[in-house]
């Protein structure tokens, strides 16, 4: 542990912490490319350790905390490839609650070009991970059943330092789309009614939802991700499906296994979303998807590793 940051026992001599001094945990489950990505990560981060195959998101994150020898640690998902530059960064933990907070940076999504926290690199404390009760360990509250992100100490950061590849197989692409097709509709973890759907769901979430619904036909299994997103939205909003099952991978596999004709399912699902929810959908189109991703956020620039999403929004909107 020489040279490593360990805030829990008072060895942190400065508020500046080099990312390279933190343990790095690779958290994999069933991702088809997990072995390939593990080799690439080890070449980039030789001190990385791995937690594999732990069922349940809450349990997996607690296992990651146990695997770390440092109180604060970096977490890399099994379908994520980080930018090497991330490990040259320095965290400045000066400020109220900075030493306690979890940081989640954006990732570029290989399917649709979206750049937000989904699948991105995160930086946890063992204390936070061990104390949380979310997903399969939730106490039943809406804001912990399917997410971590509503905890006030779970901070969304502005910068992007990795690429996520959730399309390793047709099923994984569908599952990724389905989960976001559900989550982007929720209002802080709660299901809105049909009348209030567009008012209650956050505008940025609706923008992301539309991109999941319509973009990705130019990559392998991208159309399955689009189908998954459309099915997730339809089953949540129109079929009275128990959306808390979105964190149960076995339940999602059961839904996926009932798909017999992709084209037919796309048609039925899309008709319902257009005519019953008033959403804008386009036919899967490779050229359109490629064009969109080329121009979407093409002028993106990182602003600094400790810049939060909220601070940038405040600046842009003049709060």
Image (cartoon, rainbow, N blue to C red):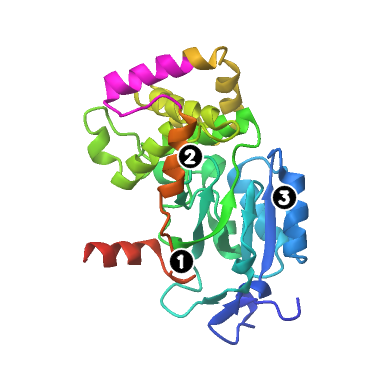
* Residue that label 1 marks: 302
Q: Secondary structure at mark 2?
A: helix
Quick one: label 2 or label 1, which is nearer the N terminus? Answer: 2
Question: Chief secondary structure of the magenta span?
Answer: helix
In this view, the residue farthest toward the bottom is 13
Judge left or right: residue 261 versus residue 273.
right
What residue would you read off at disc 2?
290
Left or right: 163, with 196 as reference point: right
Please tell me whether mark 3 or mark 2 is closer to you in this view.
2
Q: Distance of mark 3 from mark 2, alpha carbons?
A: 25 Å
The magenta span reads: 265-284
101 lies left or right of 77? left
The structure residue drawn at horizontal position 67% and vertical position 40%, both measured from the top left corner, is 55
Residue 191 image position (x, y, % from top left): 34, 34
Q: Is residue 210 above or below residue 296?
A: above
Sooner in the amino-acid sequence: mark 3 or mark 1: 3
Q: Which residue is mark 3?
A: 37
Instruction: Determine the image quadrant of residue 50.
Output: bottom right
Q: Residues within 10 Å of mark 1 (few under 14, many from 20)?
A: few
Residues at circles 3 and 1 in contact by the CB criterion of under 8 Å: no
Give x and y (percent) for residue 54: 70, 44
| Residue 38 colored in magenta in the image | no
Q: Answer above or below: position of 93 versus 230.
A: below
Where is residue 180 drawn, in percent x and y?
46, 38
């Amino acid at each position: 542990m020489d040279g490593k940051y360990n805030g829990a026992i008072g060895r942190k001599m400065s508020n500046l912490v080099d990312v390279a001094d933190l343990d790095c945990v690779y958290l994999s489950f069933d991702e088809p490319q997990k072995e390939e990505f593990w080799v690439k990560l080890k070449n980039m981060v030789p001190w990385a350790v791995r937690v594999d195959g732990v069922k349940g998101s809450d349990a997996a994150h607690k296992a990651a905390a146990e695997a770390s020898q440092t109180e604060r640690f970096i977490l890399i998902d099994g379908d994520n490839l980080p930018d090497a530059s991330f490990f040259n960064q320095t965290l400045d933990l000066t400020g109220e609650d900075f030493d306690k907070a979890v940081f989640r940076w954006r990732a570029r999504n290989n399917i649709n070009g979206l750049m937000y926290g989904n699948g991105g690199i995160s930086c946890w404390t063992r204390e936070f991970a061990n104390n949380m009760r979310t997903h399969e360990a939730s106490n039943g509250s809406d804001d912990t059943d399917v997410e971590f992100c509503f905890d006030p100490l779970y901070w969304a950061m502005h910068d992007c330092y990795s690429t996520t590849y959730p399309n390793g197989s047709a099923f994984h692409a569908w599952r990724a789309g389905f989960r976001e097709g559900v989550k982007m509709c929720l209002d802080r973890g709660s299901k809105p009614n049909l009348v209030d759907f567009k008012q209650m769901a956050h505008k940025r979430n609706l923008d992301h939802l539309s991109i999941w619904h319509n973009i990705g036909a130019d990559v392998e299994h991208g159309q399955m991700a689009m189908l998954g997103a459309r099915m997730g939205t339809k089953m949540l909003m129109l079929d009275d499906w128990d959306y808390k099952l979105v964190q149960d991978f076995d339940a999602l596999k059961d839904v996926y296994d009932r798909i017999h004709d992709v084209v037919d399912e796309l048609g039925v699902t899309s008709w319902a979303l257009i005519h019953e929810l008033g959403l804008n959908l386009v036919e899967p189109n490779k050229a359109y998807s490629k064009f969109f991703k080329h121009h979407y956020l093409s002028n993106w620039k990182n602003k600094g590793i400790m810049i939060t999403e909220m601070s940038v929004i405040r600046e842009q909107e003049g709060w």
